[in-house]
Amino acid sequence: MAETLTTEARRVSAPHSTRSPHSTDPTRSARSGRSATVRDIAVVGAGAAGTLTAMRLLRNAAEHRAPACRVWLIDPAPTGLGLAFSTNEPHHLLNVPATNMSAHVDEPGHFVQWLSRHGHGDGFVPRGRYGRYLADSLDEAAALPGAPQLLRLHERVVSVGHVDGDRDDDRAAPVELTFGTGQVLSVHAVVLALGNFPPDDSWAPPALRDAVGFFPDPWVAGLSAAVGDTGDVLLVGTGLTMVDIAHTLQRPGRVVHAVSRHGLLPQRHSDPLVPPADRPDLEGPTGLAELRRAVLSHLSRCRRTHGDWRPGMDSLRADTTALWQRLSPDDQARFMREDLRHWETHRHRIPPSSAEALQAAVDAGRVSLGRGTVTQATATSDGIRVVLDDARTLSVTAVVNCTGSRTDLTRVDDPLVTSLLRSGFAQAAPLGGFRTGSSGALLPAPGRTRAPLWTLGSLRRGDLLESTAIPEIRRQADSIARTLLSPSGVAAARGHAEQGGTHRS
Ligand SMILES: Cc1cc2nc3c(=O)[nH]c(=O)nc-3n(C[C@H](O)[C@H](O)[C@H](O)COP(=O)(O)OP(=O)(O)OC[C@H]3O[C@@H](n4cnc5c(N)ncnc54)[C@H](O)[C@@H]3O)c2cc1C
């Protein structure tokens, strides 16, 4: 039996509601006289991207007296800070300086001011601190006078469907979200902020995948305790994740080995930080080969004029997506094969203190870094024996997959993603994430009706290339919020609103 959303909202969300004392009851919006339409916007995923989207919806709606709406923030995770910022480990540092980590596009100093108010300096601060900042900023937005109601549900969304399929106009259709519990929530628009999926482990021989000491997901809760304090460890992957996990798993008498196909390590930020150089003129080059030459010559010029390539690299950031989208699909695929690793190690750098700690561990023999791939593995009575492609054999108690989040959605084992692709509401982008239109609207499969679904962050990586860090995510969150709160956003959802939102058990 369907029940009205207003009734159910009280019952389902009350224990988790972050509604402030300033907010009014759930029927407030409908009675406020601003609009007869109560629109329900669901943000699925409450990591950094979902939190920033909810925050922007609340702030923009309050500031611009937007039409009435309710914001549902849905994530099974109790903290809701996502993968990167729920860590409590003090050595897990931001890899972007605090000055560039504000939650708000229009207030660049917001995070630094928050740090100062809480007695902290800026720079590369612990990521857990950024998580607390995000949580505070969300509460702050929910407490703004006139902010929509924020309702939190600790649920996993497993599928998306039409509320009614026989619409006779071209307006976007409303959607039904089904939770793992079987409950259904009907809303007018959905933002999918699903973030990072566990890494691909298809590189691992079957015997390794079956071994007790194999950890396919480096961010699994309690990794350190599960690995234990004795025996050497092998990390597969030598990027940003490896730097964190190597630090976490170091113990006296243990060697943490880390290998990858290329053996490339993340570069370090300069100390002190240097601002980006002037943006280069890259209007001319169209193909990948020409673009590579132009970029390399820009970096060499920066090395000569600034004594460092980093300001040159950072000056490319604002134009990266436009340059990426100018490349042909063949050139994009070639970049992924031939350039991505070098691009990422130079683009996503580690703080100087993390680089120094890693070097000290290497010098002390606690960490060993290099090139290598796993060719064979055998479970033994006290761990795993691994053979690498250079014929080295390592006896370790654990192998941790640090190869980075899986981006090919056709290979992600996730019921919601599978449902979106199967139903045709979404298409996988050939180079990762979903195919998206402007403001992150999901592009449906050919011939299918567009549903009011948006996405952001790493789920747009194939389309945008530069789409995984906060500076890009906060802009995308703002753009989605503006779209959803605009008069055309209201029009798109109106058909459903007239029928009334429903939440069923
Ligand atoms: C270790 C690490 C460190 C990083 N450090 C930085 C940094 O210093 N600076 C920076 O700018 N960027 C950093 N990044 C990039 C980072 O990915 C983004 O900044 C940001 O954390 C991404 O947030 P997200 O919300 O997109 O994803 P996630 O953090 O992965 O969150 C996604 C959330 O969605 C939820 N979810 C998924 N599926 C469902 C579903 N079906 N139903 C309900 N909920 C669901 C999950 O439970 C999760 O809470 C880092 C990334 C990693 C992995």
Image (cartoon, rainbow, N blue to C red):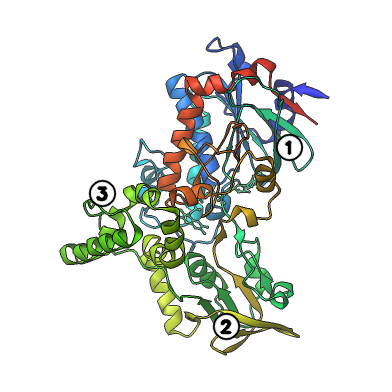
Residue type of the residue flagged with mark 2: Arg
Mark 3: few/some/many CA within 10 Å (<14, 14-19, 20+): few
Where does the image place residue 437, in percent across and percent down from the top left? 48, 38
Q: Nearer the viewer, residue 288 or 339?
A: 288
Residue 473 vertical placement versus 449 (above, below) = below
Label 1 packing within 10 angstroms: few (<14), some (14-19), many (20+): many
Using residue 274 as the reference point, say whether residue 402 is left or right of it: right
In front of the other: label 1 or label 3? Answer: 3
Quarter of the image holding residue 222? Answer: bottom right
Query: What secondary structure is marked by label 1?
Result: strand
Q: Which residue is mark 3?
A: 283
Q: For marks 1 and 2, give the one nearer the viewer.
A: 1
Task: Determine whether the residue tagged by mark 2 lies in a helix, strand or loop.
Answer: loop
Q: Vertically, is 101 above or below 357?
A: above
Tell me what residue is drawn at x 60 percent, y 11 percent. Answer: 31
State if disc 2 and disc 1 touch (CB < 8 Å): no
Locate residue 312, reporting x and y percent.
Answer: 26, 59
Q: Residue 27, labelled with which disc? A: none
Residue found farthest to the top: 33
Type of the residue with mark 1: Thr
> Mark 1 near ligand 1 (CB under 8 Å)?
no
Residue 19 place in picture, x, y as percent: 59, 29
> Dot 1 corresponds to which residue?
178
SS state under label 3? loop
Q: Which residue is mark 2?
A: 254
Distance between mark 2 and mark 3 Cα atoms: 52 Å
Does the rendering let one see residue 301? yes
Say which label, 1 or 3, has the lower sequence index: 1
